Image (spheres, coloured by chain):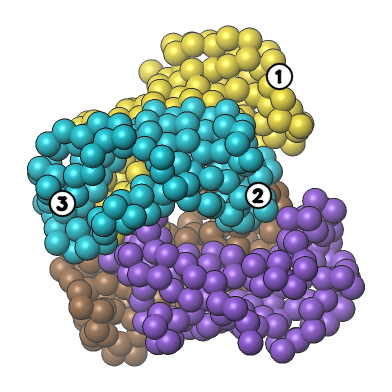
Chain colours: A brown, B purple, C cyan, D yellow
């Protein structure tokens, strides 16, 4: 199982509806993916500097319950599939074990000109 | 057909990969929905002030090509289905008629306590 | 006098306090500067692609009154001083001629390694 | 002395210039203020829910050096003055003890209608 990333909700995260703005959950999921990869020895920044940039290809996201100012939420990351050019990742976002958001994200690797390239071997983390 | 919303890309929109950050397209789609509704006589801010808040329930988004600093992109909005409690919307984002992003978004209406409520009649815009 | 940039306020701009989040005004000022320069024949994106990046050096900003969801605000830009390496700019943000925010911003030009460089002649717009 | 808040830099924080976007430092300073107050027994969210909202009145900020993708920066918070209606705060942002950004921020307390109100006694943390 993956170690969840804790995210504290500040004013910057919320909107006039009093809850976290819907686009911001995509930021938290990317933070969690980055830390997940880091825990497995893969530095997104280092790959970036070597010309291999992560790009999100598809997102399917379901918003169940909102998060609010001052709360701390948990963002889980699980790699569900790896192909030569993409990784499929599942995220669950919870607060006190209550599901707030779930999402499937597929990412690819791009070279500096924006063309897809094979995911480097050392970046391939086994699914599950 | 819907009038597209033009969005100019500034530094705030981009990331170190040199392209628009993936979460930001959700902002542009919301701007476009808001203007679409406004063109049809529905003010999101007025409904907000009367205790009817739009909340996104589901998003499925596919990123085809990136947008870059200084470009102007077009965001199209089309209502594809309306039920008593949700609206389903399709967005296409293009630049010079080249498809960059497409997405399906489902939104609901919430009361100030966060409970789903029927979409007010005057907010219901016929699909298509 | 400068042509103001109109900025419509969406959910993305607001926070749980019901008003525009304070950091976002810096985005609007940059949009306005970019359009101001564009109106004077200077493309920020083109300079960026040629290795001359604008960087903000100092900001002094005073928040007088808040902007809210659905409002349209006006962002004014005035160049007050130009040196070989910096430009000093004054911004006023108003709504219906009521002052909301005023700010002084100083920007410099950096090369791709982050070192300050002389502002290109064609970018120098006379103060006032 | 205050305990610094560590902030890791993700893609969301950066722009096409390859560095942290200038408005984002205001977010980090607010996160740090919130944690500073929390360490002193003051919950911003709780005050918010009781109708006392923090609002930034003035910011003076100087950008010395940029932060980049993958770096972790430290945000220091120091309360330098407290009046019945405002608090003046100094922030230093460093990376490996190198100064990146420094700022003076003045905040006030607003009631839900947006009018200034006295800072509650329990929120007053002695300067220094």
Residue A113 appears at what percent x and percent y? Answer: 20, 78
Pinpoint residue C9: horizontal percent, then vertical percent.
60, 52
Answer left or right for C12 relative to A118. Answer: right
Decide which of tag 2 and tag 3 comes sooner along the chain: 2
Where does label 2 land, which residue?
Answer: C71
Where residue D113 sits, quadrant-wise, is: top right
- Dividing the image into 4 quarters, which one contains the C terminus of chain D? top left
Chain for mark 3? C
| Distance of label 2 from label 3 (alpha carbons) | 36 Å
Is disc 3 on the same chain as disc 2? Answer: yes
Alpha carbons under labels 3 and 1: distance apart:
50 Å
> Dot 3, how many residues are within 10 Å of its Cα: few (below 14), some (14-19), or many (20+)?
few
According to the image, label 1 marks what residue? D117
Q: Residue at x 47, y 67 (%)?
A: B7
Q: Are marks 1 and 2 on the same chain?
A: no
Category of crowding for the residue at label 2, using alpha-carbon neighbours closer than 10 angstroms: few (below 14), some (14–19), many (at least 20):
few
Q: Is residue A45 visible?
A: no
Residue D35: numbered disc: none
What distance separates the C-alpha of mark 1 from that of mark 2?
25 Å
Query: Which x, y percent locates residue A64?
Result: 70, 68
Can you give x and y, in whole percent of width and height, for residue D68 in the image?
A: 25, 51
Query: Which residue was labeled with disc 3?
Result: C122
Depicted A95 relative to depicted D46: above or below = below
Viewer-closest of A12 and A38: A12
């Amino acid at each position: 199982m993956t170690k969840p990333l804790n995210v504290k909700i500040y004013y910057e995260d919320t909107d006039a509806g009093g809850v976290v703005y819907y686009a911001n959950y995509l930021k938290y999921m990317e933070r969690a993916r980055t830390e997940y990869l880091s825990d497995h020895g893969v530095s997104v920044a280092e790959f970036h500097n070597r010309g291999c940039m992560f790009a999100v290809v598809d997102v399917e996201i379901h918003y169940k319950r909102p998060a609010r100012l001052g709360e701390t939420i948990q963002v889980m990351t699980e790699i569900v599939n790896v192909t030569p050019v993409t990784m499929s990742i599942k995220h669950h976002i919870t607060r006190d074990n209550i599901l707030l958001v779930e999402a499937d994200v597929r990412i690819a690797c791009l070279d500096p000109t924006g063309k897809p390239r094979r995911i480097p071997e050392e970046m391939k983390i086994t699914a599950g």
